Amino acid sequence: MAAASRAKRMLGDRAEVVVFEKGSWVSFALCGTPYYIGCRVRRLDDLLYYPPEEFTRRRGIRVMLRTLVTELEPGEGRLRYRSLSTGEEGWYEYDYLVLATGARPRVLGEWLRYRNVYTLHSLGDADRVRAAAVRDDVRRIVVIGGGYTGVEAAENLAGLGRRVTIIHRRGWLLNRMLDEDMKGLVEERARAAGVELVLGRRVEGLEGSGDLAVSAVLDNGERVGGDLFIVAGGIEPAADIAEKAGIRLGETGAVWTDERMRTSVDNVYAVGDVAETRDLVTGGRVWWPFAPAANKMGYVAGTNIAGGDARFPGVVRTSAVGAFGFYVAATGLGEEEARRHGFNPVAARLKARTRAHYMGGEEIVLKVVADADTGRLLGAQAVSGDPSGFWRVNVVASLLYKGATVWDLFGVDVGYWPGLNPVWDPLTVAARLLFRQLGAAPPKPEDKGG
Amino acid sequence: MAAASRAKRMLGDRAEVVVFEKGSWVSFALCGTPYYIGCRVRRLDDLLYYPPEEFTRRRGIRVMLRTLVTELEPGEGRLRYRSLSTGEEGWYEYDYLVLATGARPRVLGEWLRYRNVYTLHSLGDADRVRAAAVRDDVRRIVVIGGGYTGVEAAENLAGLGRRVTIIHRRGWLLNRMLDEDMKGLVEERARAAGVELVLGRRVEGLEGSGDLAVSAVLDNGERVGGDLFIVAGGIEPAADIAEKAGIRLGETGAVWTDERMRTSVDNVYAVGDVAETRDLVTGGRVWWPFAPAANKMGYVAGTNIAGGDARFPGVVRTSAVGAFGFYVAATGLGEEEARRHGFNPVAARLKARTRAHYMGGEEIVLKVVADADTGRLLGAQAVSGDPSGFWRVNVVASLLYKGATVWDLFGVDVGYWPGLNPVWDPLTVAARLLFRQLGAAPPKPEDKGG
């Protein structure tokens, strides 16, 4: 919708803009679904950014809901579609095509044949999960996957008074965001919320009785019983229609794009969770299915299609999540990950207060990773009791985006007010700790001509 | 204390480090004094970062409290001091000298002869103001000055149930942080807190009766009566002792320093509120008497004296303040200020929610200023009901520090979680609005080799 809106806004009556959407909604907040399940967001409609009429009436975009695109013929500049409501089929001819088919759960089809097993990947899913979770015969809920969605779903389901178990095949929750030495606070808080953790175990299958799943079977043969199962186990780009049409996929399995969001095929763009982009820290390609990047990609594609010149250079992989009352955020590379990418990482980890000692505040654990050979910043992670950890990570994200060093992290002029941070902000303290890690001869700061 | 601690830590027993301090405290939080006055910080000791013994016993630094340095002889490498307690005088010979004499109120001596007129520039001042303000015969308090200190003092005194009037010679409060089009929320809230505002008026003098001031006389002849007067009217660098010793002052009146915090005289450094630094946005010299810069300057001077190589490249002038329940923050240049510095400024100002619409949040007004000729970011201002406005300003500060453009502001990978920000963060929206301001041909983004 970002691409459609932007192109239509720039082109006006000079262009017809049509959106084909197989589902019943456009412009919805998938990230809000866990809070809908937990009744913190009350109505499904609250998760719509705009009703479809905003696009059809006010923005002049044709929106074809419940309409599946079944085939692309980029050589001919046309696509085939079928209405899921009426079965009607047709061809549509375009000058420019934007692929925004998104991502889909990478879940075994056979698990879903049980009617108490759900994924959480659409507003419809959210509706079904909430309806199931609030039934009074549902007491034990098993969440398979301890990443973003799994953690948020577990927190919200526990908040409904259900006994929740998270099964996660990695050794700690949110392992894509946090290094192992950062896991403590989150796991403590998860357990305090009554959530049971089964870590480092893969689910081999589900055991059922009739059309109901009864337990998850782990790779060590143990079983975890439940009345309801949420599979929050990972997603993949929904790129088959592009692949079938001969559009190049990148090494990540998502559709290859350049900085203007063009694919390998003339006049075809790809944006959002189906598109591959660049990792500005490693310089490599990355699949980064997060909403802000998706929206920006749409804006950039729409601008370029309308004759402008916009670019989406890539991401430094900033993400954030709420976890059992804490705010968790990360950007760039973790320590291990940095090593895998050929860097020589050093890290500073510190516990601090988020404000001046005499103004209260919350606890924050902050970790910053840098490259010992060059002093370049590589990443940051924070877990904190207030949102300031997230924002400190965003400051590092800005510096990563500009290829900054540990000296920049020290020098950067973060404001100070005692009700907001300590006078030595944890970011500055992290820079000082990194100086120590960098040894007696830290890389010289840039000369600013002083 | 930052310079002393850093040098002593690096040099250990190889150096004697002595601190001369004319007052009775070291390492205190002057920024916290308004909250002490308002009884939100209860004890004066709460405003000490460390007791003096932390430095004397644990860090091995000699701290000479209530000891005035009366004369410097940099040619001889010595200084003269006098104990304010015993009157004893002496000379001290040094290899390196760090000037950290700070700033002082620029207030007319004659005003202070009234015993109900106070400045707010030391813990002692804070103690006296609180003692005076809580007396039950004090009902009307006049605060002269509507900058950082004036606003915080007024908020806290109003919180004690006093009738407070701010007299400010500029047309709106916090005019050094906020452009006029950003003033609305703060003034609304000030009035809602019962604070009366007299704006655009200079105080010509105080009228008294005996040793008590009775009213402030304005430049239009009007009088504002009060039982207690707080002069929060600006400060200046306490640089006379340096000037007398032949140490160069910069164009701002503060002691000239280079990036290593060296003054014009060998082996003499200057740090903190007495030192001048560089404005990284304008490229000019600036006096920036704020605590984080002061502490970093101290760290840098201490490192260099101990044989390291550290630099403080300058500031982008980020500041923050609490104002009647709002958080106010700014960095870089305002629109008018940018014009005065020869830029061709454009600005985007927007009102938004600080979080996704379905997760509550507060109001934020954000303004970002950029240069139309180059697309370079020049500054940002925010007023918000939660701290996220401050942190958004810090993200812009990081970008200013790296000389970034509006395209960088759009591209920078700020994280997203619905409980923390909208998916189109106000920062990204500001970038989009600035694109429009920049017209049909915005400056090309940097080529990132994509």
Image (cartoon, coloured by chain):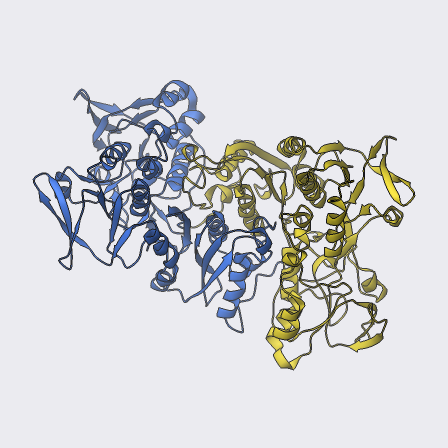
Chain colours: A blue, B yellow
Quadrant showing the N terminus of chain A: top left
- Residue A315: in sight, yes or no? no
- Image quadrant where one finds the C terminus of chain A: bottom right
Residue A143 seen in this snapshot: yes
For the point 51% across and 70% down, the residue is A436
Q: Nearer the viewer, residue A293 or A221?
A: A221
Q: Is residue B247 above or below residue A46?
A: below
Using the image as rendered, state which of residue A311 and residue B15 is in the foreground: B15
Foreground pick, B116 / A381: B116
Q: Position of residue B377 (x, y in %)?
A: 58, 43
Quick check: B439 left or right of A189? right
In percent of width and height, residue B296 lies at 62, 61
Q: Position of residue A85 (x, y in %)?
A: 19, 22
Please determine whether, in this image, residue B63 is positioned above or below residue A253. below
Image quarter for residue B417? Answer: top left
Against B259, is A133 above or below? Answer: above
Q: Quadrant of residue A132?
A: top left
Q: Quadrant of residue B259?
A: bottom right
Residue A398 vs residue A290: left or right?
right
Q: Residue at x 61, y 66 (%)?
A: B310
Front residue (pair A31, A193): A193
Percent of width and height locating residue A209: 8, 42
Query: Along the horizontal axis of the image, is A259 left or right of A236?
Result: right
